[in-house]
Image (cartoon, rainbow, N blue to C red):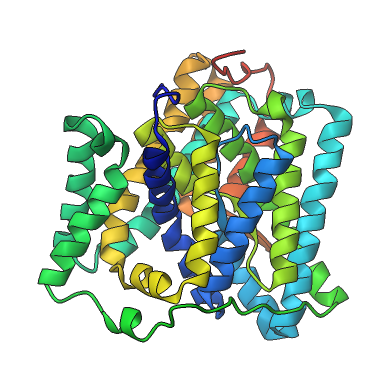
Amino acid sequence: MQSQSHLSQPKQIILGVQFLFVAFGATVLVPLLVGINPSIALFSAGVGTLIFHLITKGKVPVFLGSSFAFIAPITAATEKFGWSGALSGIVAVGVVYSLVSMLVKWRGVGFIKKIFPSVVVGPVIMVIGLSLASVGVGMAKSNWIISGVSLLSAIIAVVYFKGIIKLIPVFVGIVVGYVLSITMGKVDFTLISEAAWFSLPEFTTPTFSWEAILFMIPVAIAPLIEHVGDIYAIGAVAEKDFMKDPGLDRTMLGDGIATGLAGLMGSVPNTTYSEVTGAIELTKVTDPKVLRISAITAIIFSLVGKVSGFLKSIPVEVLGGIMLLLFGMIASVGVKTLIESKADFHKTRNMVIVSVILTVGIGGASIDFGSFSLAGIGLASVVGVILNLILPGKSKEVHMDGE
């Protein structure tokens, strides 16, 4: 693991900005898809991340950002109850997170480890990465030359270089891809020239709506389960058991407070960000301070229109090329979890659990009950938990270095 003590402040700042670039694609894309200004999403992501770090005692290296899991329900809620009504549902999702964190605090993390052994956690982490693969391909395929050069540049930086270049492969890939995009006429500079130097995010006050709250609450199930996978994943990368210290109850509470506050601001929910976990695995830099720099940078970018305009001008193909690598890195953490936990694949039950989680999660299975929908990572996790509880025998717990 990369030693953190020798990193100078300038290096920490560069790395912090780089991690924001990793999160920038979805953090901007999600609000655009639900019809709001991305500046408020950047602002709430930065504030939410700082609050998360405060609640978790500054020990967990994560960045909170917009989740794709909320796009469909937010869009539907906005059509039914208006944007301000949908915001009350987002606040309610944050409350649900907070209540579940109290349950974890009361019962302890033992029951979580029992229902999430290695043969559930490993493939769930793999699904988190692989289910996002189509998003990365979708971003990259509009110009494979640009995305391919961006991807290759990042790989060369992390594999063949040393020093600061090795630590910022994402930056390298984006810079090379951006320059190539300029030469190919793919950069829209009007996004920069027309942007104001300074502008406040567009804040919106929620309107209380029981209907919107009841509509949105079930949506919290999938991100809650994904949160457990994310905490296991970042723990595997950092070689620390964050389930114990600072505790799953604190990480869930951090997500809950950040999401509720985002709803009060007029923004989309904030959840632990898988993309950044991939970048941390790639660079081996796990100092939480670097992620707090990312958060502060996000707040600054949300206020400086020219900077936001520049970030928006980065072609989607450039970001797509980088995502092809990062999403795969997340999946590889899942494989690493199974190997280091010494999951026994001679046992039929373990083969069954892993197989079903992967096919349900990657295959896009969905269960719908009226306005309630459970799909993707959430459904795969639920199915894995159920199979683990009902099949005879038991599986090994997740092994975390440092335990």
**In the depicted structure, whether residue 363 falls above or below residue 313:** above
Q: Left or right of 27: which side holds 60?
A: right
Residue 20, position in %: x, y?
Answer: 44, 53
Residue toward you, 184 or 136: 184
**In the depicted structure, whether residue 10 falls above or below residue 257:** above
Q: Quadrant of the C terminus?
A: top right
Q: Quadrant of the N terminus?
A: top left
Residue toward you, 246 or 66: 246
- Quarter holding residue 313: bottom left
| Residue in the picture at 76% in, 45% down | 253
| Residue in the picture at 41% in, 33% down | 281
- Quarter holding residue 395: top right
Q: Left or right of 342: which side holds 221?
A: right
Residue 62, position in %: x, y?
Answer: 55, 42
Q: Can residue 164 be seen in this snapshot? A: yes
Q: Can residue 224 be seen in this snapshot? A: no
Residue 72, position in %: x, y?
Answer: 59, 70
| Residue in the picture at 73% in, 73% down | 87
| Residue in the picture at 55% in, 80% down | 35
**In the depicted structure, whether residue 209 falls above or below residue 167:** below
Residue 371, position in %: x, y?
Answer: 72, 70
Q: Left or right of 181: which side holds 26?
A: right
